[in-house]
Amino acid sequence: MALLDENRLLPVDSATRRVARDLYDAVRDLPIVSPHGHTDPRWFAEDQPFPDPARLFVTPDHYVFRMLASQGVPLTDLGVPRVDGGPTETDGRRIWRLFAGHYHLFRGTPSRLWLDHAFQEVFGIDRRLGAETADWYYDHIADCLARPEFRPRALFKQFNIEAIATTEAATDDLRWHRMIRESGWDGRVITAYRPDGVIDPDMADFADNVALFGEQTGCDTTTWTGYLDAHRARRAFFIAHGATSSDHGHASARTEDLPQAEAAALFARALAGTCTAQEADAFRGQMLTEMARMSLDDGLVMQIHPGARRNHSDQVMATFGRDKGFDIPGRTDYVTALRPLLNAVGMRPDLTVILFTLDETSYARELAPLAGAWPCLRLGPAWWFHDSPEGMRRFREMTTETAGFYNTVGFNDDTRAFCSIPARHDVARRVDCAWLADLVMSGRLAADEAPEVAHDLACRLARHAYRL
């Protein structure tokens, strides 16, 4: 029994389905361009087998363990490591059984689509996961993972990945990217510059990170000019390791364009730990504009994804640390927040700023009109909590009328879950082809134009936007 319906996510009525099916069949096997994600570059550097099914599918994937946590399953029972090194489950089979016994929780979710796609298309499984099949699944996947064709580099080729970007902190030494490059392997794995740790004064280790920043670059990061020079040096270091983009995950989309003397004073207070919450937000906003100016010099594409209210559970943050499934979307302003940056550099067509959102109410009201006017702006795809068939459809419906297709950047998967990458791209291609078929059947898009748009959305827009 196949786990997946071959016509999943395509239109229900037969005439529109035929159009969508033809479009999808033409793009389903195109290369995957994955310019924004969080896979571990160490996988590709060392090319070691994945340790076991639980540590491949469950323990690292916050989409999975947050759902189980919502039903009262302790994160320690799922093998999520504690920040204090305290006890947590290490038996992969026990973790897997727990996961399998709760698999019904994922019914109707995008996670279920991604997981079933990986089980069927990557591991050749034709029976449903549940408590009664848990051990069979575990043994079958473990047996596969022991074979050379299931190592990271082999799967990279099997998935037809043309390029994949990981994301590293500004102070990362990029050793794994260096190892990949020196190995002679021809898979294209690049980094992206993520400077949040040296930009956000609200981070507990901000001052220590800035000091390390100075040590790495030889710049005097106790001064505003030296601090900016350190960013330029580290950006150049990342570019030398393949980076084509920077990535900024701030609490808000606020930008500022302060006189340099005011910015320097603000930096001094941030470094001393004496700035207020408003001043910290202003500093982050100033740094987005500074990063945009640096992008005009070095060519890095700038990604801004604000609006996550991170680490909502104090208990989970204290016990397990960041990125453990308790980031929650919040309302986000873009029109007022981005105006200082856009008035400073937004008319420059040689600058690319890609905007993401967790606030869908801003699509038609703010984001599409902004991207439909300012030359530097592009819209990132439906993201994170909205990386779903319904979310993708809403994105197209609310942005195309104002921004069109060509002020968007196609699809990116934004994932740590390696085996979900082809599944996520497949979902996006199906949803986009279904949407395009509706446009054709309702007379809003010519039938001979739709195949080109489908190809653009599948990979060409991402290549162009991210300069790959």
Image: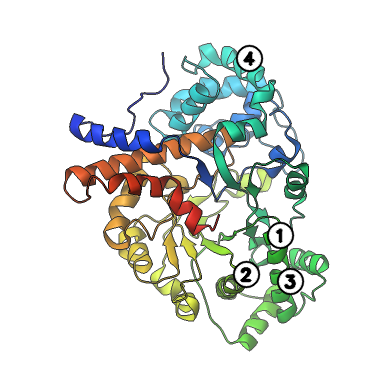
Question: Mark number for residue 298?
Answer: 2
In the figure, is residue 234 to the left or right of 105? right
The residue that appears at 70% across and 65% down in the rendered structure is 236
What colour scheme was applied to this rendering of the protein? Answer: rainbow
**Amino acid type of the residue tagged 3 in the rendering:** Ala
- The residue under label 3 is 230
**Which numbered disc flags the more N-terminal residue, 1 or 3?**
3
**Which numbered disc flags the more N-terminal residue, 2 or 3?**
3
The secondary structure type at the circle numbered 3 is: helix
**Amino acid type of the residue tagged 4 in the rendering:** Asp
**Residue 187: % across, % down:** 65, 41
**Amino acid type of the residue tagged 2 in the rendering:** Asp
In the figure, is residue 14 to the left or right of 224? left
Compared to residue 49, the image places residue 437 above or below, namely below
Question: Mark number for residue 240?
Answer: 1
Distance from Cα at disc 3 to Cα at disc 4: 50 Å
- The residue under label 4 is 139
